[in-house]
Amino acid sequence: MRPIIKTALNGLVLPFLVLLLFFTPSAFAADGLNSGDTAWILISSGLVLFMMIPGLAMFYGGLVAKKNVLSVYVQCFAITAVVTVIWTVIGYSLAFDTVGMAAGECGIHAFIGGTSKFFLRGVTPESLSGSIPELVFFIFQLTFAIITPGLIIGAFAERMKFSAMILFSAFWVILVYFPVAHMVWGGKGSFFGDMGVLDFAGGIVVHITAGVAALAAAIAVGKRKGYPAPTVPHNMTMTLTGTAMLWVGWFGFNGGSALAANGQAAMAVVVTQISPCVAALTWIAIEWIRVGRPSALGLATGAIAGLAAITPASGTVGPLGAVVIGLVSGVLANIAATWAKYRLGFDDALDVVSVHGVGGFVGIVLVSFFASSVLGGSVEGLDMGKQLGVQLFAAVSVIVYCAVVSFVLLKIIGAVVGLRVNDEEEVQGLDISDHGEAGYDL
């Protein structure tokens, strides 16, 4: 019996030592690298990229006419490629290089990063950003830079030239996205960061910038033929599938923004589930009252509005905040999409302004209150009035900056290559006129 026990004990020694090696605090803290955090942000990066390709492509693709579905897919994939190259060459450095920055100084680096990381110079597999490899931080932030201009294409769907779309997306991320990302997320010495703005995962950086640029593009490109008669979505099943992909991917979008596998990430995921559910139910309840039945389109649109609204607040609010943010965003986005845009007379084809612009703004405002521990948030002693002032100043400043730069950029591109396809090409559809291919062989 004793040899058997001895053999069994010897067999347990090695596994036990391995467990000690991997689960002692010193192992996790070695060189500052945390394998759990690293794994979570790698997964989150994949989830956010999945939101763009194929999630957003399917969501938008189902909403347009059949003759334009392929063009939407191509635009999403082309933006992914273009932004990846720009981000690698200059974008990551302009957004997150902190060389020369110091808290309290209001030099150029308060508004834009440095150039020391062009072409990822100095970023190696051993480089760390907090508890994760810097390359993981690079790829996670890249996915945000990709999806932001991707959101904008919904505003000018079915009528902008492919060449104009590529030029606009490329220069827009350089002139708008990179500076705004740096001012908000650039750390000590960044303009809005030093003010204490609360934008956990991109209410200002992603949704407000995309919504404002979408408005500028809708105005600059002009209305679709036959407006205000709405384009009937050609495949709502595709749109709902895209909605599901966006919804699930948003767990990485918001949860990953904690940059760690911790309680903040867990709460971010929880509120990211609550808000879109409330917003979707709110939207279809409004439809039910107004027209007598809920629609699949309303359910999908409401859910995305709730997701956009919870984005800036997801790291600091609790379940109560998520419910209120979902409710308010569902109501206001619905009003914007079904009434306000027609009264104002702009053709935002797929409601980017209403869903992302309005939704993002709702989240930026309401986080001023619901981040407070008094209302179930995580910020102790929050001065709600002061925080609201900071949030509004940052949001309005970015709105003005983004509107001016986007409109000027569109005018320049329009003068150089033209913004809009001609009438014949619009009637024919962009699948054939831009790409010589059809989305369906029917």
Image (spheres, rainbow, N blue to C red):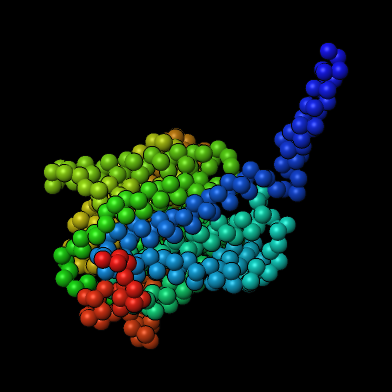
> In the visual, does 323 lie left or right of 380?
left
Residue plotted at (41% across, 50% down): 245
Residue plotted at (53% across, 50% down): 44
Q: How many marks?
A: 0
Residue 398 at x, y percent in the picture: 42, 64
Single out the residue that lies furthest toward the top. 1
Residue 150 location, quadrant: bottom left
Vertical relation: 383 (above or below) 201: above
Q: Quadrant of the N terminus?
A: top right
Residue plotted at (36% across, 58% down): 58
Vertical relation: 423 (above or below) 365: below
Residue 417 seen from this side:
yes
Residue 112 seen from this side:
no
Q: Quadrant of the C terminus?
A: bottom left
Residue 178 at x, y percent in the picture: 51, 67
Residue plotted at (26% across, 69% down): 67
Residue 439 at x, y percent in the picture: 32, 67
Residue 219 location, quadrant: bottom left
Residue 9 at x, y percent in the picture: 81, 22
Q: Nearer the viewer, residue 359 or 352?
A: 352
Single out the residue that lies furthest toward the bottom. 416
Vertical relation: 416 (above or below) 323: below
Q: Nearer the viewer, residue 196 or 229?
A: 229
